[in-house]
Amino acid sequence: MKNFLDENFLLETKTAERLYHEYAKDMPIIDYHNHLPPDQILNNINFKNLTHAWLAGDHYKWRAMRTNGVNEKYCTGEESDDVKFEKWAETVPYTMRNPLYHWTHLELQRYFRIDKILNANTAKGIYDEASEKLQTQDFNVQGLLGMMKVETVCTTDDPLDSLVHHKDYADRTEAGVNMYPAFRPDKFILIENPAFASYLYRLGDIVGFEIKDFESLMKALRSRANFFNANGCRISDHGLEQIYAADFTEEGASKALKKVLAKEAISKEEELEFKSAVLHSLGVMYSELGWVQQFHVGALRNNNLRAMRELGPDTGWDSIGDFAQAQAMSKFLGKLDEYNQLSKTIIYNLNPADNYLIGTMIGNFNDGSVAGKVQFGSGWWFLDQKQGMEDQMNILSNVGLISRFVGMLTDSRSFLSFPRHEYFRRILCNLFGNDIENGELPNDIEWIGKLVQDISYNNTKNYFGF
């Protein structure tokens, strides 16, 4: 029987062990999509304690605590940091077979060299030891990133953002980790949002002209994209239920926008026409800029209306949706491709029922111009766990080329989440290692080791061009 979380954790064969330890383990990390706060990277902060570093903003943990019967005051409420941590520690033993159990103990080991199992009895000792270390220079933000060999991070940023933190950080010659912004313009697509008009007014103030129709909106977004581009941005990102690809005209999109500004209701058809027009025009813009466009599809967000009202979004009340994806995705990508306006594209899928759909869809638009131009992104959110990652990689292997896969990202708000790259790499090496030992792949360690390194790092480096 293997020990829990030993050096060969998740590695089932000697070949898998060799692939991980000799090829994957020491590769740097490019985390090309996350939600890390850029001001904390700029200021190279030390976290006050382990609760601040580990529990603040982590809706994965909050969901588990709530499911375990923990009152909201210990999750997002005003209880003290040490008491919140105690409640999390009491919950951890009940998370067995949830990836949180693995991540929790990986993070304690990799950052703090704490090998104890977290529970109610060990909570105080672990909290005190980790919190004390977090006050030292070795455990500031740059120290935490350095421990995991993080080379580059891409934050996720609103077009309204001044990027002041990114600009100041770029001017610091001593900065260790590269930090770049990513363009996330969803609030200018989702016209049904009650706050949509206010976003347009704020955007108009920034660009210096009134946004009154579709043309002025796209001019303003292009202005902001140019600003982002000048500050190192090479990636856009969208978190949408599904791709929008209805037939549209600029006149129809303008009509919908003007109605909303006049506080008039619009129909579902008008809403979809507007969304489709903006999304297509953004796709053309990304191609002109040479950016990578990312789409996270399939989330059904803010299901609990009471919690949304009391706590706001991104607090742990989202789930997998069952949206129709294929036809609109094909139409959207196809329309861009038809006029050679399809940029490098990554599609992340949240509904496992659509995995083969996405896996085959990308093959329709890989045109030979770039290796792996259109990507089936790594398992994310509810699928960034062992089975979800294996499913995504097996399907990509079956219907595409896993050898050209750009690999893992954290999609996290926590600086302690980077062992997820290790988790991914161990699973990747185990898949290849098992195939070799089963005689399904040749025992060519040098070549397959290269593929493992490519998926872990090299493909990402080449794809994004950082």
Image (cartoon, rainbow, N blue to C red):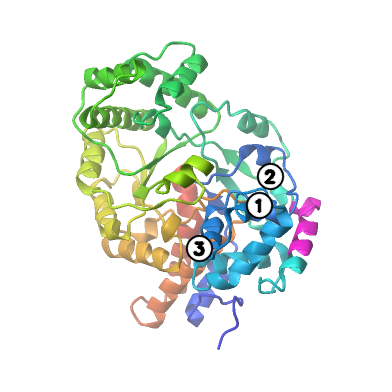
Which dot, 3 or 2, sits closer to the camera?
3
Q: Amino acid at mark 1?
A: Leu
Residue 382 numbered tag: none
Q: Quadrant of the N terminus?
A: bottom right
The picture quadrant where one finds residue 350 is: bottom left
Report the residue marked by disc 3: 67
**Segment tinted magenta in the rendering:** 127-139
Residue 29 placement, left or right of 288: right
Q: What residue appears at the point 28 percent right and 65 percent down from the top-left corner?
A: 398
Q: Is residue 220 above or below residue 23?
A: above
Q: Amino acid at mark 2?
A: Gly
The picture quadrant where one finds residue 288 is: top left
Label 2 or label 1, whichever comes before in sequence order = 1
**Local crowd at mark 2 within 10 Å, few (<14), some, or many (≥20)?**
some
Report the residue marked by disc 2: 176
Q: Nearer the viewer, residue 395 or 97?
A: 97
Q: What residue appears at the point 67 percent right and 57 percent down from the top-left corner?
A: 84
Alpha-carbon span between mark 3 and mark 1: 31 Å
Label 3 or label 1, whichever comes before in sequence order = 3
The kind of secondary structure element at disc 3 is: helix
Residue 362 placement, left or right of 313: left
Which dot, 2 or 1, sits closer to the camera?
1
Are discs 2 and 1 less than 8 Å apart at CB? yes
Which dot, 3 or 1, sits closer to the camera?
3
Alpha-carbon span between mark 3 and mark 2: 39 Å
Q: Is residue 219 magenta?
A: no
Q: Nearer the viewer, residue 155 or 289?
A: 155
**Local crowd at mark 1 within 10 Å, few (<14), some, or many (≥20)?**
many
Residue 381 placement, left or right of 89: left
Q: Is residue 367 above or below residue 121?
A: above
Report the residue marked by disc 1: 145
Q: Is residue 137 magenta?
A: yes
